[in-house]
Image (cartoon, rainbow, N blue to C red):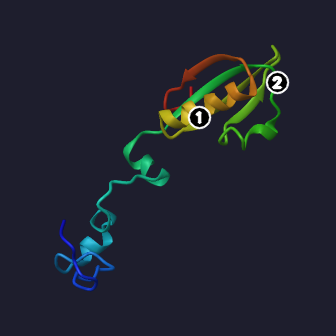
Amino acid sequence: MVVVPFGAMAPRRSTPPRLGPLTRAQLDDHHARSPHDVRTGHHIGSYVQRVQYEIVVDGHLSSRWTAWFDGFAITGEPDGTSVLRGVVADQAALHGLLQKLRDLGIPLLALTQLDPKGN
């Protein structure tokens, strides 16, 4: 075992050493500032095409649920079902929406991916 007297160790640096000056383009590029490739919600739209879905559930939901279901439009049908229509950013967002329906105990009758024109 090696005993190092107090104060003999080099002081810790509070910031990592810089490898060299950054250019203006590197400063403007968030990837140059971070070693991690982090994509937040506003970045997803530039990488993934957003998809529109139609979800049919049993029972009538009032329009007040629109905000809770991520802005999906809710329409009550005469046959006792409700149709939710809206756009999701990715599969994770779709699964989150389906989990909300499951957690409320609302029976899912149909899930349809609509073409980009919404037909």
Q: Who is closer to the viewer here, 52 or 33?
A: 33
**Which tag, 1 or 2, sits closer to the chain's start?**
2
Which of the 4 quarters of the picture holds residue 21? Answer: bottom left
- Measured Cα–Cα span from mark 1 to mark 2: 21 Å
Q: Who is closer to the viewer here, 32 or 63?
A: 32
Is 79 drawn above or below residue 94 in the view shown?
Answer: above
Image location (x, y in percent) of residue 19: 17, 75
Is 94 drawn above or below residue 11 in the view shown?
Answer: above
Q: Quadrant of the C terminus?
A: top right
Q: Say what secondary structure mark 2 lies in.
A: loop
Image location (x, y in percent) of residue 15: 31, 78
Q: Which mark is residue 96?
A: 1
Dot 1 alpha-carbon crowd within 10 angstroms: few under 14, some 14 to 19, many 20 or more: few
Dot 2 alpha-carbon crowd within 10 angstroms: few under 14, some 14 to 19, many 20 or more: some
Q: Who is closer to the viewer here, 76 or 1?
A: 1
The kind of residue tagged 2 is: His
Residue underneath mark 2: 60
Q: Quadrant of the N terminus?
A: bottom left
User: On the rendered structure, is 117 left or right of 81?
Assistant: left
The kind of residue tagged 1 is: Gly
Residue at image position (50%, 35%) is 92
Residue at image position (57%, 29%) is 53
